[in-house]
Amino acid sequence: MGTGWPSSGDACTATATGFIQLYANPAATTFESLYTNGYALYTNTGLTTAYVGGSPDNWYKTQNAPGGTSIRIDNVGFIDNAIVIC
């Protein structure tokens, strides 16, 4: 994942991003399962430091090219009910 954007459309059409490595409960294999099971995203492998998505640039994408998936992450690391296939 990389730099945040203000909307899913902006995230989906972007072609260059910074890169952030995020970690999640290994039981979740998709962004949808992270959301459904209430798992947060973390900045460390010990899953103790939640990623702060925040606002207004809280939309992120899964790849450094057009396409992929765009998700909205809140300020305590949870995926909002917003998962967009680009």
Image (cartoon, rainbow, N blue to C red):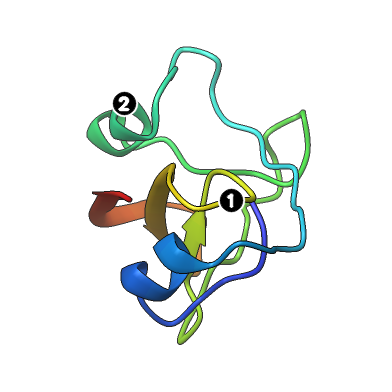
Q: What's the residue at 29%, 32% (across, down)?
A: 32
- Determine which residue is flagged by label 1: 65
Q: Is mark 1 on a helix, strand or loop?
A: loop
Query: Foreground residue, 66 or 42?
Result: 66
- Nearest to viewer (mark 2 / mark 1): 1
Instruction: Tell me which numbered mark, 2 or 1, is placed earlier along the sequence.
Output: 2
Q: What's the residue at 73%, 46% (across, down)?
A: 43
Q: How crowded is mark 1: few (under 14 residues within 10 Å), some or many (20 or more)?
A: some
Task: Examine the rendered structure and indicate whether residue 21 appears above or below residue 71.
Answer: above
- Determine which residue is flagged by label 2: 33
Horizontal side, residue 2 vs residue 78: left or right: right
User: Where residue 34 sits: x, y (%)?
Assistant: 37, 32
Query: Foreground residue, 20 or 64?
Result: 64
Horizontal side, residue 86 vs residue 6: left or right: left
User: Where residue 65 sits: x, y (%)?
Assistant: 58, 50
Residue 74 appears in the figure: no
Instruction: Residue type at mark 1: give it.
Output: Ala
Q: Residues within 10 Å of mark 2 (few under 14, many from 20)?
A: few
Q: What's the residue at 38%, 34% (across, down)?
A: 31
Query: Foreground residue, 62 or 34?
Result: 62
Measured in 3D between alpha carbons, the distance from the residue under mark 2 to the one under mark 1, in whole angstroms, is 23 Å
Q: What's the residue at 55%, 15% (across, down)?
A: 26
Query: Foreground residue, 86 or 76?
Result: 86
User: Where residue 52 sits: x, y (%)?
Assistant: 60, 65
